Image (spheres, rainbow, N blue to C red):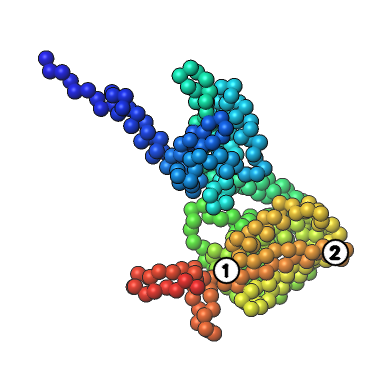
């Protein structure tokens, strides 16, 4: 009878080597330390996550990874370990060799000797930066959804008040409101990115702002002086989002409300910048965005202008009104960068380096 060959994993030496290889090659940082918090072992995952080599880390206190304001965490860990307790999925922050911080989830387990006494701990650290960023994005989307839904009801009420002042009969009121709500629906789509990522068409600044303001204002309540410049497809959504926010606030408690005396919008090109000024008359309070703090709408506008339009957004309240100023990168709005006088280059190419498909070197400006 032929004896079957034994598996290479059956010997204790082979099994130990196999487990050591798993520990060394896992993406998680696996570290052991003694009860004095001195690092005893340091795997490849720890080196990749924290930036220290094993030679640099072994023999050093584990507290070198802990930010100053979280040093008490290690004291608590050691106390629990001495009692034989295990810490699972503890989310915290640790410091890398380069001084940067990383969000991690820790699992800390006691290590015992042959007599069962706790002599140290094994610690597994997992990078949860991507998870935290996803959670923050989800929270931002939920906040924006709540903000927009609340705005929708307030805007509908404001538009109804405006239409009621202008309509001479119930039939006319219904007709005017239907038209305004249809226009509002069309404008709202400009402020929402296409989830399919379809590329849109460019438009002029005047047409874009006029389209957004059409449901809210008429020729008696709006004055506009805007240059005839193109707005590229990538700038339409962020710019529409900001103007839509300003318009909804104006209807609720600003220049287009019962107390308002209209709005004025103008823009000028100045040294590679596009400065848009929005003025409202008879604004006495900043509404939901109190003077002493920044509300979600203001924060959203500031973030959108900074990240998508290369600029700044600020508001100034006074007893006679409110002025909002958008100082934008002209190239981000038009999609075109001027080179020498009349020469231009698409904005998307600016800042790239390497070679094109034809082998032409693209400078990194």
> Any mark on residue 318, and which?
2
> Any mark on residue 11, and which?
none
Indicate the quadrant where residue 287 lies. Answer: bottom right
Whether residue 156 is visible here, answered yes or no, is: no
Q: Label 1: which residue?
A: 332
Above or below 339: residue 105 = above
Indicate the quadrant where residue 325 lies. Answer: bottom right
Depth check: give the residue in front, 225 or 345. 345
Residue at 82% across / 62% down in the picture? 317
How far apart, in angstroms, are the residues tagged by discs 2 and 1? Answer: 31 Å
Residue 195, percent from left and from top: 52, 52
Is disc 1 placed on a helix, strand or loop?
helix
Q: Is residue 164 left or right of residue 185?
A: right
Residue 356, percent from left and from top: 38, 70
Residue at 51% across / 46% down in the picture? 50
Is disc 2 placed on a helix, strand or loop?
strand
């Amino acid at each position: 009878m032929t004896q079957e060959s034994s598996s290479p994993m059956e010997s204790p030496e082979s099994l130990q080597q196999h487990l050591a290889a798993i520990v060394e090659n896992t993406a998680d940082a696996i570290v052991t330390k003694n009860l004095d918090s001195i690092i005893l072992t340091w795997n490849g995952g720890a080196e990749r996550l924290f930036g220290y080599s094993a030679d640099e880390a072994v023999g050093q206190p584990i507290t070198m990874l802990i930010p100053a304001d979280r040093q008490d965490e290690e004291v608590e860990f050691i106390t629990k370990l001495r009692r034989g307790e295990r810490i699972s999925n503890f989310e915290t922050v640790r410091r890398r060799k380069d001084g940067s911080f990383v969000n991690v989830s820790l699992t800390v387990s006691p290590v015992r000797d042959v007599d069962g006494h706790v002599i140290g701990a094994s610690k597994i650290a997992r990078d949860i930066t991507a998870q935290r960023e996803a959670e923050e994005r989800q929270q931002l989307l939920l906040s924006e959804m709540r903000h927009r839904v609340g705005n929708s009801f307030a805007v509908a009420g404001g538009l109804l008040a405006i239409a009621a002042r202008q309509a001479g009969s119930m039939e006319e009121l219904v007709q005017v409101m239907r038209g305004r709500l249809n226009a509002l629906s069309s404008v709202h789509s400009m402020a929402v990115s296409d989830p399919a990522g379809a590329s849109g068409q460019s438009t002029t600044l005047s047409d874009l702002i006029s389209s957004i303001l059409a449901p809210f204002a008429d020729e008696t309540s709006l004055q506009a002086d805007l240059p005839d410049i193109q707005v590229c497809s990538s700038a339409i959504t962020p710019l529409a989002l900001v103007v839509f926010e300003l318009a909804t606030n104006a209807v609720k408690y600003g220049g287009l409300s019962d107390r308002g005396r209209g709005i004025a919008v103008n823009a000028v090109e100045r040294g590679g910048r596009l400065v848009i000024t929005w003025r409202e008359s008879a604004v006495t309070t900043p509404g939901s965005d109190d003077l002493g703090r920044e509300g979600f709408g203001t924060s959203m506008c500031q973030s959108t202008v900074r990240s998508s339009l290369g600029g700044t957004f600020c508001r100034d309240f006074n007893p006679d009104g409110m002025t909002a100023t958008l100082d934008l990168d002209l190239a981000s709005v038009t999609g075109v960068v001027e080179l020498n006088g009349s020469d231009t280059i698409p904005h998307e190419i600016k800042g790239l380096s390497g070679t094109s498909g034809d082998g032409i070197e693209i400078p990194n400006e």
